[in-house]
Image (cartoon, rainbow, N blue to C red):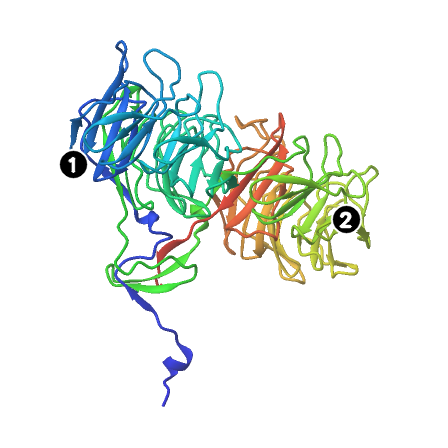
């Protein structure tokens, strides 16, 4: 006979350790042996238990450039045979028994095309690169490699050359030129990340051509280290300043993982193995000194490694606790995204997710421009029927509404977007050019307006017509609203902190937001979980840019508002996710800082985390 538990319950997996987002997220840096000669501008190759540190610069002396090569055994460094030509800003690839080192800058000469090959006991000059350069990146083996990017002394390069063990051939160039690029992989499948212009751009090599892929989280000129394969790699260290951040690549996206103990740039590193092991050595460290410090990266996944899965409940036998995987919004953060093409607008409308968004209309000057966002860049598409500002938006990137606005005059015009073009549809009942906010879908939208006096007008769209419903309790202008037409939350507006919850029939006052402001952005799918962000704080006295603009982000958990991580750029009047996003995933695009317009996009993400289940 079946038990109640069997019919109605569910099995809870027992694990000795917590689940993890990836093998890389279990990794840490630990101290290794110190090089015999502290230096920077060096090259490296190998793995963290068998590596080469090649050439470099000691600084302070003449010529200062080195031919010294040291070999690492996982605990200590030993000097071995020198290069034939002393130089700096070289790159290497291969192993401790078979490697090449290419390019560089001699003392005190220009860029060089010299390439040397290592056979485990001595270095031999082999065929030169086709283009003399330094600050290149080598990827592959001693007999099958590519050398990418670099600097001639006067120009950054996109040049990519392929090595077959005896000669070099120029093959598909990078899309963007640069030097000090981080790279990992092979001669037929590689990743080239960041570079000299302090960028977050990343390109992928398939053996014949480079294509742009997901951007890194931190903009930097790497000058640091990199290791791994085209589907599992790491970048770490770099500039400006001295970077300690480490990012892991899983073949499609970047995740920040454990930082280096010693922030540095201009260092050497290993080729590594699939992002699970690596080493960084030498470089320039704070305050501005050459270092010989080595750090080793290793991952420590459980023998029965289990990938994190949102909503998963399990029992951790090691800590004797039941746990659940969730997205704690307090752990969320904003990261840089692509810049809009129309950078001088605010009071625009928008909708969609952080990787599939739409922005339209706006002021300064008044515009009808519509743009689509793919998580990397914005593309101009068909315009609204007329230029207008102070518009409200709802829906998704392929099915959106643009409501109200100022043409002038003030209008109650509504336009519907089908993924290609805008079409005028039934007008809403009242016209107002400021303070309009909306949320929901293209066929079920909630629109709120401040008309005059104590009223806060609300209308519902059912896909064919507008109906006036119960007003808000507190009149407000430009508050943030998120959710759907039957379940929404509205907070702030002008100088008020009042927040109200919508249940499909009426508004109920709930806990107030922390900072009064208007022209906010918002994101959320229901009235129990949402975020509001940015905003204009009339009359505020503050050192923030433009005095009244705000970077603040607040999270609503269904009971109260909590301040979480700020936007990098304080602003108001931009476009945002609305109901297209959630409290864990959103975008903020464009707006006005109080002193300048911006086209900047920021993306909000909340990583999964394992939290102990407590019973009270």
According to the picture, the residue beneath numbered tag 2 turns out to be 422
According to the picture, the residue beneath numbered tag 1 turns out to be 75
Q: Residues within 10 Å of mark 1 (few under 14, many from 20)?
A: some
- Residue most toward the top? 62
Real-space Cα separation, disc 1 to disc 2, in angstroms: 65 Å
Which part of the image, by quadrant, shows the N terminus? bottom left
Whichever of labels 1 and 2 marks the residue nearer the N terminus, that label is 1
Q: Percent position (x, y) of residue 345? A: 68, 33
Give above or below for 195 relative to 401. above
Q: In this view of the protein, can residue 263 be seen by the observer?
A: no
Which part of the image, by quadrant, shows the C terminus? bottom left
- Residue most toward the front? 166
| Total residue callouts | 2
Q: Percent position (x, y) of residue 358? A: 65, 45
Kindly state the secondary structure of the residue where label 2 is placed.
strand
Kindly state the secondary structure of the residue where label 1 is placed.
loop
- Along the line of sight, the residue nearer the viewer: 112 or 124: 124
């Amino acid at each position: 006979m079946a038990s109640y538990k069997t019919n109605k319950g569910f099995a809870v997996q027992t694990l000795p350790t917590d689940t993890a987002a990836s093998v890389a997220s279990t990794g840490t840096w630990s101290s290794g042996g110190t090089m015999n000669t502290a230096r920077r501008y060096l090259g490296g190759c190998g793995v963290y238990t068998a590596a080469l540190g090649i050439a470099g610069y000691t600084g302070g002396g003449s010529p200062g450039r080195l031919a010294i090569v040291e070999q690492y055994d996982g605990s200590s460094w030993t000097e071995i045979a020198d290069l034939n030509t002393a130089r700096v800003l070289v790159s290497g690839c291969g192993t401790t028994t078979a490697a090449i080192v290419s390019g560089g800058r001699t003392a005190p000469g220009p860029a060089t095309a010299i390439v040397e090959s290592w056979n485990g006991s001595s270095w031999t000059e082999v065929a030169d690169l086709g283009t003399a350069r330094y600050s290149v990146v080598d990827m592959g083996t001693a007999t099958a490699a590519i050398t990418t990017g670099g600097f001639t002394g006067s120009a950054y390069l996109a040049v990519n050359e392929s090595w077959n063990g005896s000669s070099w051939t120029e093959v598909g160039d990078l899309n963007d030129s640069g030097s000090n690029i981080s790279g990992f992989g092979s001669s037929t499948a590689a990743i080239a990340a960041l570079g000299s212009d302090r960028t977050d751009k990343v390109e992928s090599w398939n053996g014949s051509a480079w294509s742009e892929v997901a951007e890194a989280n931190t903009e930097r000129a790497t000058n640091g280290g990199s290791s791994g394969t085209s589907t599992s790699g790491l970048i770490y260290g770099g500039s400006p300043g001295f970077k300690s951040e480490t990012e892991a690549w899983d073949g499609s996206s970047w995740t920040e993982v454990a930082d280096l103990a010693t922030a540095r740039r201009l260092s050497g590193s290993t080729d590594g193995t699939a992002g699970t092991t690596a080493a960084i050595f030498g470089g320039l460290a704070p305050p501005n000194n050459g270092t010989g410090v080595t750090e080793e990266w290793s991952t420590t996944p459980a023998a029965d490694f289990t990938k994190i899965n949102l909503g998963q409940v399990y029992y951790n036998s090691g800590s004797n606790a039941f746990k659940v995987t969730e997205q704690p919004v307090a752990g969320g953060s904003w990261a840089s995204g692509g810049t809009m093409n129309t950078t001088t607008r605010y009071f625009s409308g928008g909708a969609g997710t952080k990787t599939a968004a739409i922005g339209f209309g706006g002021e300064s000057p008044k515009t009808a421009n519509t743009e689509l966002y793919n998580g990397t860049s914005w593309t101009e598409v068909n315009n609204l029927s007329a230029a207008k500002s102070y518009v409200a938006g709802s829906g998704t990137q392929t099915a959106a509404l643009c409501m109200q606005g100022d043409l002038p005059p003030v209008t109650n015009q509504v336009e519907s977007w089908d993924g290609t073009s805008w079409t005028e549809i039934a007008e809403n009942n009242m016209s107002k050019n400021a303070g309009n906010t909306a949320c929901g879908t293209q066929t079920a939208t909630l629109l709120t307006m401040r008309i005059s006096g104590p009223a806060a007008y609300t209308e519902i769209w059912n896909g064919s017509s507008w109906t006036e419903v119960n007003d808000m309790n507190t009149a407000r202008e430009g508050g943030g609203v998120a959710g759907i037409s039957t379940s929404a939350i509205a907070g702030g507006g002008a100088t008020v902190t009042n927040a109200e919850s919508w249940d499909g029939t009426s508004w109920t006052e709930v806990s107030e937001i922390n900072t009064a402001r208007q022209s906010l952005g918002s994101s959320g799918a229901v009235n129990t979980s949402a975020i509001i962000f940015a905003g204009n704080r009339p009359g505020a006295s503050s050192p923030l840019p433009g005095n009244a603009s705000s970077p603040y982000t607040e999270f609503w958990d269904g009971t109260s508002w909590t301040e979480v991580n700020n936007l990098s750029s304080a602003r108001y009047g931009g476009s945002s996710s609305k109901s297209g996003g959630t409290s864990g995933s959103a975008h903020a695009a464009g707006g006005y800082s109080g002193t300048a317009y911006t086209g900047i996009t920021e993306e909000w993400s909340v990583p999964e985390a394992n939290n102990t289940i407590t019973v009270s």
